[in-house]
Image (tube, helix red, strand yellow):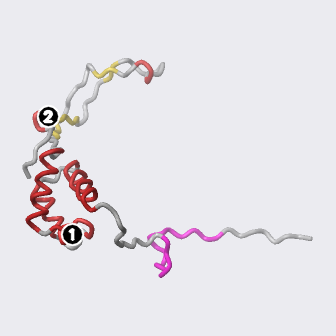
Amino acid sequence: MSESPVRPREKVHPLTRAVEPNDPMALHGFEVPGDSELMFRMLVEEFARMGHGCESIMAMFRDPEYQVPHGLWQLYGDEDTQRRLADVLAQCGVLRTTVEFTNNVAVHDLEIPEHLQTEEEPATTERGDAAASVDPQHVGNSSQP
């Protein structure tokens, strides 16, 4: 008995393949039972960690395109949402960073930890390309938008 060789399927990139109605990768949003206060807090903290301030977060809650925040806004109303938002931001703050890029910075004192060094690498290195620095004055908690 001779088996016919198995022919591999032609590979199709997901961006070029047709969308099918029962595609398992389609996103479907729906409500589930849970603690709305906890969901509110988690969303606000996540947005704050992404650098969004009070006004920006309120805009998301008012926008129907943001289904979960908008549903919470409908549940609590505008005034109560603002009050809750201010309470959460007063506790967690808003992460803000400033990055400055400078050219031709030589970094002579950059030490490579011993456990990461290889025989070919020196303990220090120089960089002449763009370098980024974070200004510590602009990092921290702030509830300002």
Contact, CB < 8 Å: mark 2 with mark 1? Answer: no
Looking at the rendering, the stretch of residues picked out in magenta corresponds to: 9-24
Give the structural element (helix, strand or loop) at label 2: loop
Instruction: Determine whether the residue tagged by mark 1 lies in a helix, strand or loop.
Output: helix
Residue at image position (46%, 73%) is 16
Magenta stretch secondary structure, dominant: loop
Return the x and y of residue 85 as percentages of the image width and height.
Answer: 14, 56
Q: Residue drawn at (13%, 65%), measured in percent from left and top?
A: 59
Residue at 15% over, 46% down: 94
Task: Compare marks 2 and 1 and give the one earlier in the sequence.
Answer: 1
Q: Please state which amino acid type lies under the numbered disc 2.
A: Asp
Q: Position of residue 106 (x, y in %)?
A: 22, 25
Q: Which quarter of the rendering shows the N terminus? A: bottom right
> Vertical placement of 19 versus 33: above or below?
below
Q: Is residue 10 magenta?
A: yes
Which label sits on residue 102?
none
Task: Establish if 29 lies above or below 50.
Answer: below
Tag 1: residue type?
His
- What residue is disc 1 on? 70
Q: Is residue 110 left or right of residue 81?
A: right
Is residue 127 toward the left or the right of residue 10 in the image?
A: left
Where is residue 75 shown, x and y percent of the image?
20, 70
Vertical side of 12 occupied by 131: above or below: above
Label 2 and label 1: CA atoms lie apart by: 35 Å
Which x, y percent locates residue 125? 32, 23
The residue tagged 2 is 135
Q: Nearer the viewer, residue 116 or 139?
A: 139
Horizontally, is 21 left or right of 134 in the view?
right
